[in-house]
Image (cartoon, helix red, strand yellow):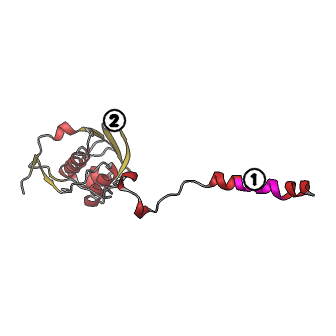
Amino acid sequence: MIKKFTHRIGIPAVIALFLLQACGGPDVKPEAERDKDDVLEEVIVEQPDTVLFWTVDNSNKLKTRVYKDSVKITSPESVINGINSIYPSVELKFVKKSGDTIYAHIDSAETLTSDMGSFGASEYISTVVLNLTTLDSVNFVNLDFQEGSHASPGVFSKNRYERFKEKEE
């Protein structure tokens, strides 16, 4: 009788006590009671999804600062969104960042290569390059699109636009 009791109730009871003991962890203080030393504070800074650093006056080789916030922008996509906001008829798409180069593509470049004229296309490319090379460690922009009468694809260097002066406000 004792043997049956031990096998039916005793052993499962010991196992249950063992599991309860093993699963119980140390008591954790509620969030409000924790010392600040016990908690690593993580600061998450959200970046805007649309940023334009500069507007460009190509004929006078001037750039005017637009984005002046203290948040450091690291996202090429948010800069491309900014460019697309002022040139909605030319949809620039981010492809990748490799080394110090941003790769971007324009599916339908007819507006850029035919409709804007040579001056408009040049100002557009200046705007793209000046804005994207403002990002840290970006020195080149590789623009891929179908060549047209007023613009050609290629790799554009940050150095090419060093002569642009910042317009005083």
Q: Amino acid at mark 2?
A: Gly
Q: Position of residue 68 (x, y in %)?
A: 18, 56
As drawn, which residue projects farthest toward the front?
Answer: 2
Describe residue 21's horizontal placement relative to residue 142 as left or right.
right
Query: Mark 1 against mark 2, which lies toward the viewer?
Result: 1
Is residue 135 highlighted in magenta?
no
Which quadrant of the rendered structure holds the N terminus? bottom right
Q: Nearer the viewer, residue 30 or 108?
A: 30
| Residue 145 placement (x, y as % from top left) | 34, 45
Using the rendered view, name the quadrant where residue 51 is placed: bottom left
Q: Give the amino acid at mark 1.
A: Ile
Camera-side residue of 136 and 81: 136
Q: Quadrant of the C terminus?
A: bottom left
In the image, which residues are magenta?
A: 9-17
- Residue 15 is marked as 1
Q: Which residue is mark 2?
A: 99
User: Could you give the CA–CA distance between mark 1 and mark 2, rounded to whole angstroms?
Assistant: 58 Å
The residue located at (43%, 62%) in the rendering is 31
Are the residues flagged by discs 1 and 2 in contact, CB closer than 8 Å? no
Which residue is located at x 65 percent, y 53 percent?
21
Q: Residue at x 41, y 62 (%)?
A: 33
- Front one among 24 and 99: 24
Q: Is residue 33 left or right of residue 66?
A: right
Up-down relation of residue 47 to residue 154 (above or below)? below
